[in-house]
Image (cartoon, rainbow, N blue to C red):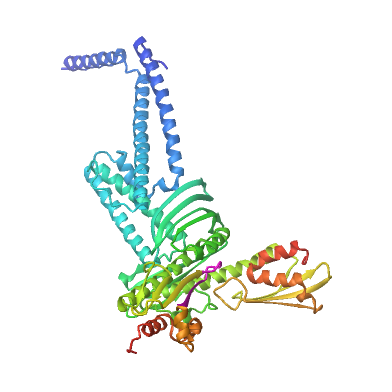
Amino acid sequence: MMEEVSQEDMEEVEVLEAQIKHLQAEVSALKCQQQDNHRDITFHFRGEMQDAMLCMCGQRQGDKKEKEKVLSRLKEEVEEMEADLKLQTEMNGISLNSCTTKTLQSSDRKLVQQLCVSGHCSELVFQVEFQLSEVKEGSGCVRTISGLNVVVDASDLQNFNSFLSGVEESRDLLLLFRTLRTFSNRCDDRCRTFQHFQEKYPSVVSLPGGCSSEVVTLNHPELSGCLLLVRWSVDVSKEGGVSPKIELLAKIPERALQLFPSLPVGGASEAFQSLLRLLGPEAALESVIMAVGLSRDT
Amino acid sequence: MEGASKKGVLSHLCLLEVQARSRKTQPKQPSRVHELKAKAEALMRQREQLRAEVETHKNIKKLRASMDQQCRHEDEEEEGMDEDSENSNLLRLMARHTQLKDLLHAYDVIGGYNIIKTRQGKGLCVSIATAYEGVYFETYNLELDLKPTVRISRHDVPPFIPLNNLAEQSSMQTEVRTLLDPLSQHLNAFAGRKQQLQLVKELHKSVEVMESNVLCSFLVLMFSLPREKTALLCSLDYSDCTRCLPTRVHFECDDKELPNSPDWKKHRSLLMETPVHKALITMREMGNIL
């Protein structure tokens, strides 16, 4: 350098150089934090979100109109997503209320996330946790699930337990949700049918456990000792096959049976099964109810 | 005349010379200080920007966590915000965006039908995902016309899947899912059987696949029996196409008594209850097949 530098200038240079070193260290630390943030896929923003981020950080200097534009574009995108979410909820019959993700590994080729999804399917409340890995292979992407953990809150869990442990082992997430939905539909069918009959024949039909229970009792108000029990269970096989099973149980006191020896009450359960095969669940139930009610109507 | 103009030029030249000399001796702005000041300012701007970004990220994460908490416990929306500022609105919106994105992704992963409405509600596009043992396979697509009646207009479902039958048996006019659920069952069972066959070929090289069909509903395998030094033909019938397990297992062997031996009776039940690629592992471990 050919110019002369005065003493004052040299001091200023030292001060500035120190300040710059300090700033560089701060910037480097902040960049590290920024990289960490970007590694989490959920908070790695693109498109409208990226514009919004730049807005928040004041890169779009002071222009209020610009900020409003960004806000309104983002709002539009969010509204579209809300509508999409509503559609997916309706069409899938499953309501997801939360999905949290944690990025475990992210590179150009591979993405591994830990997902925790919770929601409900009609009356069934579930929480599902698993690891999702997406690996780029050729022109496509291979998606794999591992470490599946399922918690279902249902009133009758016995039907479900062997299925749930089977599904955790086979990591069949799709089967889990298909089965949850089918199971929930069958339980809803049962509940609706029970409620319908309880309202139509209130003196004969009672639901000791409420309409979501498996059991409904039928009895004539004047024959208090004689009871017919209908148990409608929804079984789930290990493979995810959902099968409703309806059976009739008669509770008639010994004395009554003695009075009417020819009463074919003993065969009531089998007879009901034939009725079921012929008429289907609703009509079969209705005929039994009407018979118990000693109804003249047909 | 000449004398006067010469004088004017000379004096002008003198003036210029003085000006030039004075410029040389003026104290120059020390360019090093100038340079450093500019650098420091640039770094400060960068730092402020990064701080704002990191802070914003932190706020969005916090907001998102509290929104997730609310949604899980199905609380009502927060009544009013602390500051109704533009910034807080934008932050809230951004947090909601991340939440929605995650939820929509979740629907995709759990096998949701990824419904897209088209042509102002007159059409519907549906995707059906298939997976087996935690690995996702093909996704099949259907395009439905909704008006005047619900019917399938386009699809890429393979012809050996009885799509038309399923459509006829469903109540898709009122509830599209009555078609989609059974179709998904068929497609997933097919994906499962197909993958089982693939795994048999990969993991059990000493087992020969004699016969199979496109639907993977029929499989004939030939086992080499190390002890008896003979071969055994095993046919698996998957007549229920909604399942990945066979409905019938049949053994054929020169030694007519062998299929009735206790070990092979066990193998028959095993093959009925366990996916074939897994059953073969057990059979090999028991020493009955190569």
Q: Is residue B27 above or below residue B144?
A: above
- B144 or A13, nearer to the observer: B144
Residue drawn at x 24%, y 13% as measured from the top left: B14
Residues in magenta?
A: A236-251
- B129 or A171, nearer to the observer: A171
Q: Which image quarter is the N terminus of chain B in?
A: top left
- B11 or B53, nearer to the observer: B53
Q: Is residue B124 visible?
A: yes
Residue drawn at x 43%, y 27% as measured from the top left: A25
The location of residue A171, given as percent across then percent down, is 55, 59
The location of residue B269, given as percent across then percent down, is 67, 71
Q: Is residue A240 magenta?
A: yes
The location of residue A145, given as percent across then percent down, is 54, 56
Q: Is residue B20 magenta?
A: no
Residue drawn at x 49%, y 56% as measured from the top left: A150
Q: Is residue A279 above or below residue B221?
A: below
Q: Is residue B233 left or right of residue A227?
A: right
Q: Is residue A77 left or right of residue B251?
A: left
